[in-house]
Image (tube, helix red, strand yellow):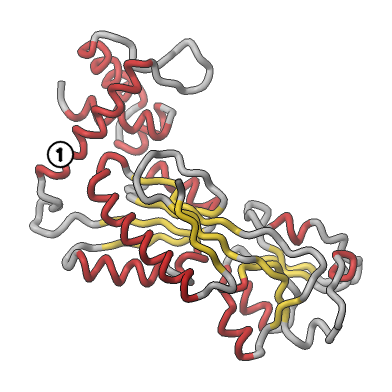
Amino acid sequence: MNLKHVEAFYWLCQLETYQQVADRLNLTQPAVSARVRVLESLVGKPLVDRSRADFALTERGVQTLALAERMLELKSSMLDGTDGSGQRARIRIAAVSLTVKTWMPMMLSAIHAAFPGTPCDLVSASDHQLARYLPTADIDLAFLSNAPPKMQISRLFTVNYEVRWIAHPDVVPGKTAPFRTQDLSHFPVVHYPRTSPLFPLTSELDSAASADQHSSNSLGTLIWMLKQGLGIAAIPAVSVEEELAAGELQVIETETVPRVLKVRCAYANMARKERVAQFLDIAYDSARTFCQSHPDWCEFVADE
């Protein structure tokens, strides 16, 4: 047995298809299958339940996965966290843009203070883009919107962001009573793309035929469009906290308050569990501190 067999099995458990593992490890699909078969022959029992249409592990497979995670983690510890050139092994984080605009800078600053010399790469994109990106990238932690965690690791948490209808003051005239949904339908709208968890909020508006319809998959661009008076949008209010305070944008009071947007750690590289847990601790403290200083628009929830 060698670690190549263990690594192929570990990534098969993470990605659940032989082709994705092949792409991840720069192998052919038959080579991945062969490595898993060799590991099964050495263990003496099937690890993958091939009687099912979807990917599933046998009981022995579940036990072997836990051991595989430990073996790969020991490999990382044996190399003393270096990349072979004397540099500290880099940490790679994927995050939706909302976290980058809120508590992620605090996390990165704390990482650099706690682990000087450790390169830390940040990839920011939409949920949909990151979900497609993760299987083929060396990501250690990923923070996504409305995505349940798929791993067991300590100090998981959720940040609930309050979503509100936002507009330039000139777009929505003053009104004492809260707006109804049909009232909002008369205004031009700036949509998120269909893949966004916030898209249903704007798509449910039965917009008037004469109302403009805009869209953007970038939070920064969407905010700029709002400041230009191009329409209304349902977004996490904390992302425009400064603009609201300056009067550049305003909250539209509505009869029904939109649901919160949840951001969670949806992926952690369990092959580097001990090291990743240290960075997750920093994320935990950074997100909690940010929410405590912005209680009106976000809430920190420690997962039980």
- The residue at the point 53 percent across, 17 percent down is 53
- On the picture, is 221 further left or further right than 75? right
Hey, which quadrant is residue 249 in on the image?
bottom right
Hey, which quadrant is residue 279 in on the image?
bottom left
Quadrant (top left, top right, bottom left, bottom right) of the N terminus: top left
**Amino acid type of the residue tagged 1 in the rendering:** Lys
Q: Is residue 12 above or below residue 222?
A: above
The x and y percentages for residue 230 are 74, 78
| SS at circle 1 | helix
- The residue at the point 49 percent across, 46 percent down is 132
- On the picture, is 149 further left or further right than 79? right
In this view, the residue farthest toward the bottom is 246
The x and y percentages for residue 251 are 71, 78
Q: Is residue 178 above or below residue 301?
A: below
The x and y percentages for residue 11 are 33, 33
In this view, the residue farthest toward the front is 304
Q: Is residue 259 above or below residue 290?
A: above
Marker count (numbered): 1
Q: Is residue 15 above or below residue 117?
A: above
- The residue at the point 36 percent across, 63 percent down is 285
The x and y percentages for residue 106 are 36, 71
- The residue at the point 30 percent across, 72 percent down is 109
Mark 1 Cα shell of 10 Å, populated few (<14), some (14-19), many (≥20): some
> Dot 1 corresponds to which residue?
75
